[in-house]
Image (cartoon, helix red, strand yellow):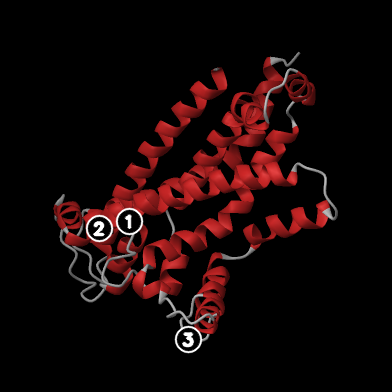
Amino acid sequence: MATKASRTAARAMISPAVLLLLGWMIVPLGMTLYFSFLRYNLITPGDNPFVGWENYNWFITDPSFTDAMFNTLVMVGGVLLITVVGGILFALLLDRPMFGQGLIRIMVIAPFFVMPTVSALVWKNMFMNPVNGVFGRLATSLGFQPIDFFGQIPLASIIFIVSWQWLPFATLILLTALQSLDQEQLEASEMDGARWLSRFWYIMLPHLARAITVVILIQTIFLLSIFAEILVTTNGGPGTATTNLTYLIYVSSLLQFDVGMGSAGGVIAIILANIVAIFLMRMIGKNLDA
């Protein structure tokens, strides 16, 4: 049983790490809040008057803001749909005994360890290029007109690239959860005459509910800040077709040199991300209590 002295010693030993972590978070956040209330443009660094909520107003009323919010929601929703459904299917497939099962699992999980910039470059130049890409050459050989993925369906192309990278993560979590399922339940239901679809719907899927919630929570937090894939492939275009909130902040801060407006956009993004995180945490809490 821990004594009062041991608890005090434990707090004293862990306090430097906690203080360092708090400083690591609070200092950048404080500077972002500070700059968001200034008219701070890198072109005129000496003139930084206090403007209050003006930057927030300009950022929210920017015509690109509505498109960025819509694109952000579509990207997150599209990637979640593909990765959750695909992850369940891959988990069901990899859970079955097969030749070379270990190697196949490694190959399925491998894309998760590829850097976003590298994966975006590979898909852009080796596969989706309408002239020299694999898909373009395949379409030409079959007598079809090659598709300009980033010109005709840019948002869907980015969703596909991001989904390819996050699908292994969902598969790994769901496969682990599926392997923890009591096989006696499945055998008993099979002996009672239940079809595979019924066993999946009434036994496997409820068992995977918690793992699915965890996948949605973790992926959503990261997917709200998709950036590298957009920068490498489309630069937010054509127009604002693939501009999400993160890329809009980048444009304001580093391309238009408006640090004040970019900081305001960063604060708005933090608020929206926390709202989503709180909602998902409540959802996962109810799921764990069920």
The amino acid sitting under disc 1 is Asn
Q: Is residue 212 left or right of residue 193?
A: left
Q: Which comes sooner in the sequence, label 2 or label 3? A: 2
Q: Secondary structure at mark 2?
A: helix
Marks 2/3: CA–CA distance: 30 Å
Which quadrant holds the N terminus?
top right
- Measured in 3D between alpha carbons, the distance from the residue under mark 3 to the one under mark 1, in whole angstroms, is 27 Å
Disc 1 element? helix
**Could you tell me which residue is drawn at 67 percent across and 22 percent down?**
7
**Cβ atoms under marks 3 and 1 closer than 8 Å:** no
Mark 3 residue type = Val
Residue 20 appears anywhere in the view: no
Residue projecting furthest to the bottom: 131
Q: Residues within 10 Å of mark 3 (few under 14, many from 20)?
A: some
Q: Which mark is residue 59?
A: none
Residue 119 lies in quadrant: bottom right
Q: Position of residue 93 (x, y in %)?
A: 71, 46
Point out residue 173 in the picture as x, y percentages from the top left corner: 65, 41
**Residue under label 2:** 67
Q: Position of residue 187 (x, y in %)?
A: 78, 24
Nearer the observer, 79 or 261 = 79
Q: Secondary structure at mark 3?
A: loop
> How much space separates mark 1 and mark 2, taking CA atoms?
6 Å
Between disc 3 and disc 1, whose residue precedes? 1
Location of mark 3 (residue): 131
Q: Amino acid at mark 2?
A: Asp
Residue 59 in view, yes or no: yes
Q: Residues within 10 Å of mark 1 (few under 14, many from 20)?
A: some
Residue position marked by numbered label 1 in the rendering: 71
Q: Is residue 191 left or right of residue 43?
A: right
Is mark 1 in CB contact (under 8 Å) with mark 2? yes
